Structures are given as structure tokens and as C-alpha cells.
Amino acid sequence: MPVTSRGPDFSLNTDFTRLVGVRFPIMNAGMGWVSLPKMVAAVSNAGGLGMLGAGVQPPSVVAEQIREIRALTDKPFGINCPLALPNAVENARLALLEEVPVINYSMGRGDWIAEAAARYGGKTIASVNSVKLAQSAEQRGADAVIATGFEAAGHAGEIGTFVLLQRLREVLTIPIVAAGGVASGAGLVGALALGASAVSLGTRFAVSAESTWHDNFKQTALGKDVHDTLVSEKFGGSPNRLMRTPQAEKILASQLNPISAFLYSFKIARQMDVSYLKLAADTLRQGPKRAFDMLSMASMQRYNRLSFEGDVTKGTIHAGQSVGLLHDVPDSADIIRRILSEAEETMARLNRTFAG
Ligand SMILES: Cc1cc2nc3c(=O)[nH]c(=O)nc-3n(C[C@H](O)[C@H](O)[C@H](O)COP(=O)(O)O)c2cc1C
């Protein structure tokens, strides 16, 4: 089926598409519990880069998911590992062993991943939200960075995507993927114009047919505007952007209850299949601030779980400002097709403008 009016052989050529071997400079963000094999394969089969969200899942589960992806697509795909979270380092090791084509790491140093991936021709992409982190990722061997702006769901930085992209283009030589606020073809064209070589979309793909979000939340998202997210350190330690829900507003107005968070963290350790003692020792070794952040994250996990049961009152869920740009729940492959045809329309409009 033709992807756009340009026909089935149409592709876009950027240093990102060349780096990872895909037709289009579009990827779904790796989202723990949300971007699972069906979405990954749909995005990769449509010519983008599908990204598995390993989250805090046990390696045995992630190994099965990698097998599932490989059964569904023969195209390049990647895996996102948030290194500061439990199970993530183990999942990155597993990805190296499995020779996953692209490893996207966040929340930690990835030099050892870059070094090991290079041996089998694998590529590494570091998620960053500041100039300092981006420069450090390039120096430590990352093949590309995902520049995450203030608009983004989750660990949004302080700087908006518009400014961050232009500044990173000044200081980096490796490809930059724009993340935060991109949900359309105009967003793709804008990001490319500002120095990006690709875009990564989280919230857009979270509201798709293949996303594991409960239908209640997909429908809730469609009623939200661009103002309907909240960002706070109270949502798990470092600043985190969530959809504005009754529970998110309640958490914002209250203080963390360390006892109930501590008790809940036992349950989480069991669900993640990690030893509680190991989890506690690893956390304490990183200092009191980190221990407090982990308790805060543990307490957020329970509300995140409730969102997967469809509880829109007590559940919390990550969402970026681009939630206000979404008006339907398409298939992931349709998202790619739509972005490409919108990008063509945008380019035609710009050409008309510049033609005077
Ligand atoms: C539901 C959801 C879950 C996410 N989970 C992760 C994650 O596990 N790891 C990660 O690095 N980023 C995660 N993110 C953040 C995305 O990687 C990305 O930075 C962000 O979604 C980009 O902004 P956008 O939502 O405006 O597209 C998540 C985002 C969403 C919407």
C-alpha cells in the first residue's frame, strides 16, 4: 500500500535513517508497559523505528518480548532501558546478548552499552534533556541522542524542544531525535528544520490501537487540551509530566506518605521479580536523595497500575502536552502514514509561502 502520494518506494533520507537503517525518521518512544511487541512491530513494519519499552519488567519477560517482535518483523527495532530503575541494567545486558539492533538508554551512563553494541553493529541512543547530558552522551560513545524537551511526557527537561534542538545542533555532531510535543507531520517538518534528524513520539503512540493503555484513558486523553498535564517532582522524584487526572492533582496537593510507600515497595519488588534486599541495598548505596526518590517512584507505581485497570479517578498516567493535539485512536501504522502525508502538505504550504 502506498505510504503517501509518493508511492510505495518513498523514503526520507536523514543521518538517523541511515544510522539505524529505516525508511522514515519516525520512532515510537520506548514506554514501559505501553510500547510492547505489537506496537514495535507495527511501527517497524510501517518503515519507522519501533521501540520496546522494557520499563522495570523482569529480563525473562523482556526476552520473550524480543522473540515476539522478531516473529512479527524482520525490520530494525530497538529497546528502551531506563538504567536507574530496577531490572534495567539486566535488560540492557540481555539486549546486547540478543544483539538488538538499537538500544535506547536513559537515566544513567551508557558507555559500556555503546562499546558492547558496536561489536555486533548495534547502535545506541541516549535520552537526554539538557546540553550537558547530551555532550556527555556523545563523548561516551552514543550514536545519537533523543533530545527531550519540556513539553514531553515523563522526565521532561527545563528547556522547550524548540530551543533545545537548535542548541544541541550547535554543539553535537551525532544525529538528534526530537522528543516532546511532536504528534503531527508539521511537527516532523518543524523538528527537521530545527536540526533534528528524526522524531520520537510518546503520547501520540500511547493513544493508538496497539497501546496497552486502558480504553478509558485513551478516551479521556481525547477530551484533554494542551494545558491538561501536570509536571512535578512529587510524581516520582525528578520532575515528571503526567496527564491532569483527579489523582495527579491530589498528589500534587499532598505530601508523600513514606510508610505506605515503603510498604508498597515490597509488593513492587515481588512484581518485578527482584530481591527486596538487593533493591534496598542498591538504592541506599546511591544516597538518601535517591532512596527518597525510589520511595516516591514506588508510591507512583501503584497509581500507574490502577490506570491500567482503567480507573480514571485513582489512576495516574504519563502524558505530554501533545495530548491536546490528539483527536482519535488510530493504528500505529496509520500514525506513520498520516505524519508523512501531513509533512508533505506542510512542505507544499512552505514552498508556496517561499515562492512569494
Ligand atoms: C505512557 C508513557 C510512558 C513512558 N515511559 C517511558 C519509559 O519507560 N522510558 C523512557 O525513557 N521514557 C518514557 N516516556 C517518555 C517518552 O520517552 C518521551 O520522552 C515523551 O513521551 C516524548 O513526549 P511526547 O509524549 O510529547 O511525545 C513515556 C511516555 C509516555 C507517554
Image (cartoon, rainbow, N blue to C red):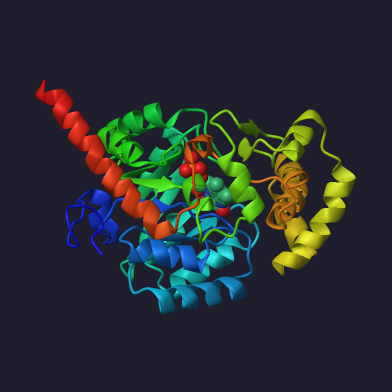
Residue at the location (79% across, 63% down)? Answer: 276
Q: Is residue 207 visible?
A: yes
Expressed as whole percent of the image width and height from the top left, the position of residue 171 reads 31, 33
Q: Judge left or right: residue 48 versus residue 156.
A: left
Dividing the picture into quadrants, the one containing residue 280 is bottom right
Expressed as whole percent of the image width and height from the top left, the position of residue 115 reads 38, 61
Expressed as whole percent of the image width and height from the top left, the position of residue 22 reads 28, 60
Dividing the picture into quadrants, the one containing residue 120 is bottom left
Taking depth in this image into account, of 170 and 343 the one nearest to the observer is 343
View extreme (left): residue = 355
Q: Judge left or right: residue 260 versus residue 173.
A: right
View extreme (right): residue = 259
Q: Is residue 142 visible?
A: no
Residue at the location (29% across, 42% down)? Answer: 342
Dividing the picture into quadrants, the one containing residue 308 is bottom right
- Which quarter shows the N terminus? bottom left
Residue at the location (38% across, 29% down)? Answer: 162
Q: How many marks?
A: 0
Taking depth in this image into account, of 111 and 88 the one nearest to the observer is 88
Q: Judge left or right: residue 197 versus residue 137.
A: left
Expressed as whole percent of the image width and height from the top left, the position of residue 156 reads 54, 36
Residue at the location (72% across, 39% down)? Answer: 289
Taking depth in this image into account, of 60 and 222 the one nearest to the observer is 222
